[in-house]
Amino acid sequence: MTVQEKIGVMICGHGSRNQNAMKEFSTVSEGLKGRFGDVPVEYGYLEFANPVISHGLDKLRDAGCTKVLAVPGMLFAAGHAKNDIPSVLNTYQAQNPGMEVIYGRELGVDLKMIRAAAARIQEAIDAADSEVPLTETMLMVVGRGSSDPDANSNINKIMRMLWEGFGFGWGEVCYSGVTFPLVEPGLEHAAKLGYRRIIVFPYFLFTGVLIKRIYGFTDEVAARHADIEFLKAGYLGSHELVLSTFVDRVNEIEAGQNVMNCQMCKYREQVLGFEDQVGLAQESHHHHVEGIGGGLENCPCKGDCDASCRDEQFCKEHGLKWTPLHSHDHAHDHTHGDGHSHDHSHSHDDGHHHHPYPHADHPLGPNSMTRTSPNLKKD
């Protein structure tokens, strides 16, 4: 007698200490329920938030699911989508041989995602107090930034599609961290090009510290260039087309069309400047912060965390739970092509390490951020 297969869907997110970001992610996940008929949908995070991915998988297992279609809640495929999430899923699969877990691909460069991005940009244009011709307007798309050049290059294609689709006078890309150019130098460069209006669009899924930084840098540069109108477009959020793209990724798995673009993957090919990372083992670097970060619901920032919760003295003053981070014997900024990240320095020897980004000392790059913005907080 053959046991009937029961399918479940798992949405795998990164996680954040920002409660508002986690509410937005859960809204997306909840919005997917019912779009697959009676198929149960769960979600979980790599770090800094609950439920963790394994807990979501436990719920699907307890619901009787024998086959799980898991998709990364990531914009692009960098370290989290290529290494960390697969490692967690592989570990769970090994511990639960009665349940098959099949991994899907990231949201990626997709026409639905571009249309969702265009909608956010159009909203900013419509809300502006004045009318400026598109040919006298410049678009600045802000990506998360990653140590994976393939993920970084994808944001440039998104930008070009938006630039050419709208017919803006000019378009460029900058990044919130890890790579270059960063937001502030990118906007300063943009201000020299002579356009009457600059639209700053964060190509991010959810809110968080990085969104606040992007808008903060925009205000700083705008204050130095009063002759230019700066518009701050909203991030993608739970736009209907974003949800539709998630559905497409799940359906691709079931249809056997789940194809991740590995042509320019630094782990498979000798990408210029990253040749030493070909063939690295697939492993997660997030076990040490899995599930921590709770107890911040009553934070004075009302869920819009500015990372003060990482300061022990701040937590003592406000009666908050302080969860110290432990980690490797070096400082690093975890790299994302997914719309968010975190930066921390801590120490322990757990047998793994992150490869340094080869252009960290670029004059417009990550190490320059602390020099040009001494008041910038770590997230």
Image (cartoon, helix red, strand yellow):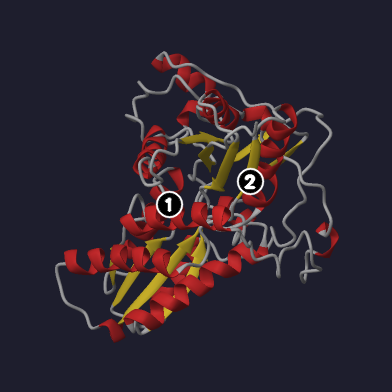
When the figure is inspected, residue 25 is found, relative to residue 148, above or below; the finding is above
Q: Earlier in the sequence, mark 1 or mark 2?
A: 2
Q: Nearer the viewer, mark 1 or mark 2?
A: 2
Identify which amino acid the numbered label 1 is placed on. Leu
Q: Position of residue 186 (x, y in %)?
A: 49, 68
Residue at point 40% right, 32% down?
A: 19
Q: Position of residue 316 (x, y in %)?
A: 47, 14
Q: Residues within 10 Å of mark 2 (few under 14, many from 20)?
A: many
When the figure is inspected, residue 215 is found, relative to residue 153, above or below; the finding is above
Residue at point 81% right, 68% down?
A: 270
Residue at point 52% right, 26% down?
A: 59
Q: In which image quadrant can residue 218 be found? A: bottom left
Q: Quadrant of the N terminus?
A: top right
Q: Position of residue 109 (x, y in %)?
A: 51, 67
Identify which amino acid the numbered label 2 is placed on. Ile
When the figure is inspected, residue 279 is found, relative to residue 261, above or below; the finding is above
Residue marked by disc 1: 205
Q: In which image quadrant can residue 62 be found? A: top right
- Residue 130 numbered tag: none
Residue 103 or 282: which is nearer the viewer? 103
* 199 to the left or right of 322: left
Helix, strand or loop at mark 2: strand
Helix, strand or loop at mark 1: loop
- Residue 102 numbered tag: 2
Q: Is any part of residue 189 visible from this angle? A: no
* Residues marked 1 and 2 touching at CB (< 8 Å): no
Q: Position of residue 225 (x, y in %)?
A: 33, 69
Residue at point 36% right, 64% down?
A: 117
Q: Is any part of residue 27 visible from this angle? A: yes
The residues tagged by marks 1 and 2 sit, at their Cα atoms, a distance apart of 23 Å
* 250 to the left or right of 27: right
